[in-house]
Amino acid sequence: MLFSSLITVCCANDAIICDTHNNIQIKESQVQGSPKTSSIQASINGHALSVVFTENLGTVHVEVTDTNGGSVDLTDMHTPNGYNAYIHHAGSYVVTFTLGNGDEYYGEFDVVE
């Protein structure tokens, strides 16, 4: 589900972890056309969710929900602009992307304190 990479800064004899960056695997939910999973790159860094669209997918509906299905953030945006959201509370979440043609993709992620 999540792939991790750590960026470490070394100062003298001490190693300090300054950033934990987790890539979110994007999966197909309902896809009629050519799959675009590789065109959506998402990651979570602490409470900050970042999404990069690597190609123009038109207008994309983006929704972040918690494990109870409650909406945390909801927006329609033009691509290839990026999307950023701050997730206030720790927990498990799903980000869903619905393209203008109805194709739907999602990614699951956790926010930890």
Image (spheres, rainbow, N blue to C red):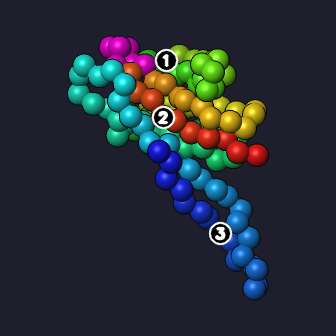
Query: Foreground residue, 87 or 91?
Result: 91
Q: Which residue is mark 2?
A: 107
Amino acid under label 1? His
- Crowding around mark 1 (Cα neighbors within 10 Å: few <14, some 14 to 19, many 20+) is some
Relative image position of residue 56 (x, y in whole percent): 37, 28
| Image-based side of 47 in relation to 109, left or right | right
Q: Which residue is mark 1?
A: 61
Relative horizontal placement of residue 39, taking residue 16 as reference (left or right): left
Instruction: Check disc 3 and report the residue beneath it.
Output: 8
| Residue drawn 35% across the image and 40% down it | 38
Q: Is residue 77 among what the camera can see?
A: no
The residue nearer to you, when weighing 18 against 27, is 27
* Circles 1 and 3: CB atoms closer than 8 Å: no
Q: Which mark is residue 40?
A: none
User: So how many labels did they put on this image?
Assistant: 3
Residue at horizontal 49%, vertical 25%?
96
1 relative to 44 in the view: left or right: left
Residue sitting nearer the eye, 52 or 4: 4
**Which segment did they paint magenta?**
98-103
Q: Residue at x 71, y 62 (%)?
A: 18
Query: Sequence order check: which comes first, mark 2 or mark 3?
Result: 3
Q: State the separation of the CA atoms marked 2 and 3.
A: 26 Å
Quarter of the rendering containing residue 93: top right
Residue 111 screen position, x and y as percent: 67, 41
